[in-house]
Image (cartoon, rainbow, N blue to C red):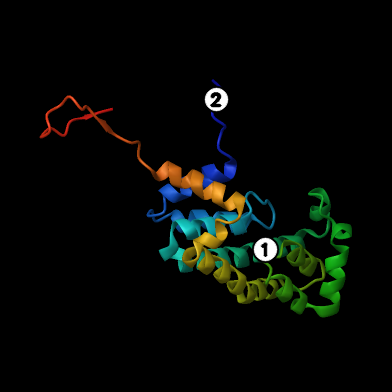
Amino acid sequence: MTAPARPSRTVLVLRRLDRAAHQRWFLPAVGVFPLSDYALPVLPNQVLLTALAVLHPRRWWALTVTFVTAAGLGALLVAATVHATGPWLLDAIGGGPDALTGVTSQIRRHGLWALAALSLLPWPPRTAVLACALAGIPPWAIAAVVMAVRPLPVAAMAFTAANAPHLLRRLPRIDRLLTAVEADRTPPATTYDMTTPANSSTPRV
């Protein structure tokens, strides 16, 4: 017999967060992922957000606020770091100015309006934030634009996931993730000894 396949990292993270959904540290723990997404992407945050909203539909608004706040704080920290260190930090992590040429030209032409437009996409505006920082735009202004615009796509994704989960389940990847997490919620079935008296409720495992 072959050993069962090990759950993916995304499934493991979702299971742990799902179990901790009623803990005080649940939302701060969730916020770590969009916060770190600008510098060190760990999980696809749109998948994380929608899956948690399906699993906990009553908390979709709290999840939205958490993701938006973390995205704004992450943009502020990354922009401030680039301002303080200069382009050499981007070169060190393989994302130097040459890799941002296309976005940087749009930022120089349209300014923060380009950042606002890119912030409407489902994924965080990682490249646009870096390009804005390299263009000399103040970190507080970058963070303010992200905080002002990100609520629209984030709330739309969370609301849809909470109120129309069947639409997301049409996506094979999302359906597999949710099925794996929901299976972990289900307790093992208990069988009963058919030889025990009818008035006895002693289970046999």
Image quarter where the N terminus lies is top right
Q: Amino acid at mark 2?
A: Ala
Of 198 and 186, which appears nearest the observer?
198
> Who is closer to the viewer here, 86 or 147?
147
Q: Position of residue 101 (x, y in %)?
A: 88, 64
Mark 2 surroundings: few (<14), some (14-19) or many (≥20) residues within 10 A: few
Q: Residue at x 41, y 50 (%)?
A: 20
Task: Tell me the residue at 87%/66% (across/down).
Answer: 102
Could you say which is closer to the camera, residue 97 or residue 20?
Answer: 20
Q: Helix, strand, or loop for circle 2?
A: loop
Q: How many dots with numbers? A: 2
Q: Earlier in the sequence, mark 1 or mark 2?
A: 2
- Residues 42 and 204: in front is 204
Q: Residue at x 55, y 56 (%)?
A: 169
User: In x, y percent, where is residue 85?
Assistant: 77, 58
Up the image or down, 11 lies above or below 128; here it is above
Where does the image place residue 116, in percent across and percent down from the top left? 71, 75
Q: Badge 1 is on which residue? A: 124
**Which quadrant: the C terminus?**
top left
Whether residue 205 can be seen here: yes
Residue indicated by mark 2: 3
Snapshot quadrant of residue 71: bottom right
In this picture, is 108 found above or below 129?
Answer: below
Q: Measuring 50% from the left and 53% from the top, which residue is drawn there?
A: 29
Front disc: 1 or 2: 2
How packed mark 1 is, by other alpha carbons closer than 10 Å (few <14, some 14-19, many 20 or more), is many
- Secondary element under disc 1, as helix, strand or loop, is loop
Q: Amino acid at mark 1?
A: Pro
Left or right: residue 38 versus residue 178 is right
Task: Report, in whole angstroms, how far the alpha carbon at label 1 lies from the one at label 2.
Answer: 37 Å
Please determine whether, in this image, residue 182 is positioned above or below residue 146.
above
Determine whether 194 is above or below 111 in the image: above
